[in-house]
């Protein structure tokens, strides 16, 4: 049973920084893409950042230049460094690991989410 667990969320002032981590436990995790999503109250889930096994990254326009996604194959699966946080970044952040064949998602794993609150 694969389990993803996010950590690092919390309350931060606008302009501040947080670093989210996603760790994995269990066996059988197969993926070729990792991603962070977020869901703010009353809004749909939003893709924030992705990183492939090859190291290619992509970001939502709203976070470009402020957030950095990275991989770490030691103790954590990946991290999201969030700088210059804005009120609109407040949301529950979820990590996702997915295995794709072409555009088809074969396997999909999600964490339980971690809350990020930004005070203005």
Image: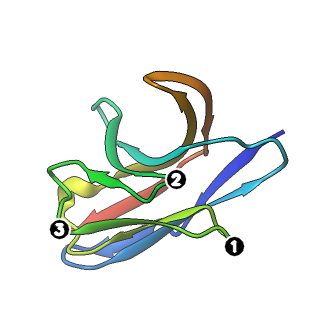
Q: Find disc 3 in the rendering and name its residue.
A: 65
Residue 119, placed above or below residue 95: below
In the image, which disc is placed on residue 56?
Answer: none
Examine the rendering and report whether any part of residue 40 can be seen.
no
Q: Residues within 10 Å of mark 2 (few under 14, many from 20)?
A: few
Classify the position of the C terminus by image quarter.
Answer: bottom left
Most foreground residue, 82 or 54? 54
Q: Find disc 2 in the rendering and name its residue.
A: 53
Q: Earlier in the sequence, mark 2 or mark 3?
A: 2
Q: CA distance from mark 2 to mark 3?
A: 21 Å
Q: Residues within 10 Å of mark 1 (few under 14, many from 20)?
A: few
Secondary structure of residue under mark 2: loop
Number of numbered labels in the structure image: 3
Residue 79, placed above or below residue 44: below
Residue drawn at the location 69% of the way across and 73% of the way down: 74
Where, by quadrant of the figure, is residue 13 drawn? Answer: bottom left
Most foreground residue, 12 or 69? 69
Q: In the drawing, does residue 104 fall left or right of residue 107?
A: left
Considering every residue shown, the one lying at the far bottom of the view is: 16
Residue drawn at the location 35% of the way across and 33% of the way down: 45
The x and y percentages for residue 55 are 43, 59
Most foreground residue, 23 or 107? 107
Secondary structure of residue under mark 1: loop
Residue drawn at the location 69% of the way across and 41% of the way down: 30
Q: Nearer the viewer, mark 2 or mark 1?
A: 2
Secondary structure of residue under mark 3: loop
Q: CA distance from mark 3 to mark 1?
A: 26 Å
Q: Find disc 1 in the rendering and name its residue.
A: 74
Q: In the drawing, does residue 38 fall left or right of residue 115?
A: left
Q: Nearer the viewer, mark 3 or mark 1?
A: 1
Q: Earlier in the sequence, mark 3 or mark 1?
A: 3
């Amino acid at each position: 049973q694969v389990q993803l667990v996010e950590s690092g969320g919390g309350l931060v002032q606008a302009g501040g920084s947080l670093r989210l981590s996603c760790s994995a436990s269990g066996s059988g995790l197969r993926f070729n893409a990792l991603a962070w999503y977020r869901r703010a109250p009353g809004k749909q889930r939003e893709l924030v950042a992705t990183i492939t096994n090859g190291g290619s990254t992509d970001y939502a326009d709203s976070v470009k230049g402020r957030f950095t996604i990275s991989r770490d194959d030691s103790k954590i699966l990946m991290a999201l460094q969030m700088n210059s946080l804005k009120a609109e970044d407040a949301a529950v952040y979820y990590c996702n690991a997915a295995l794709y064949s072409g555009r088809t998602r074969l396997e999909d794993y999600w964490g339980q989410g971690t809350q990020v609150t930004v005070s203005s």
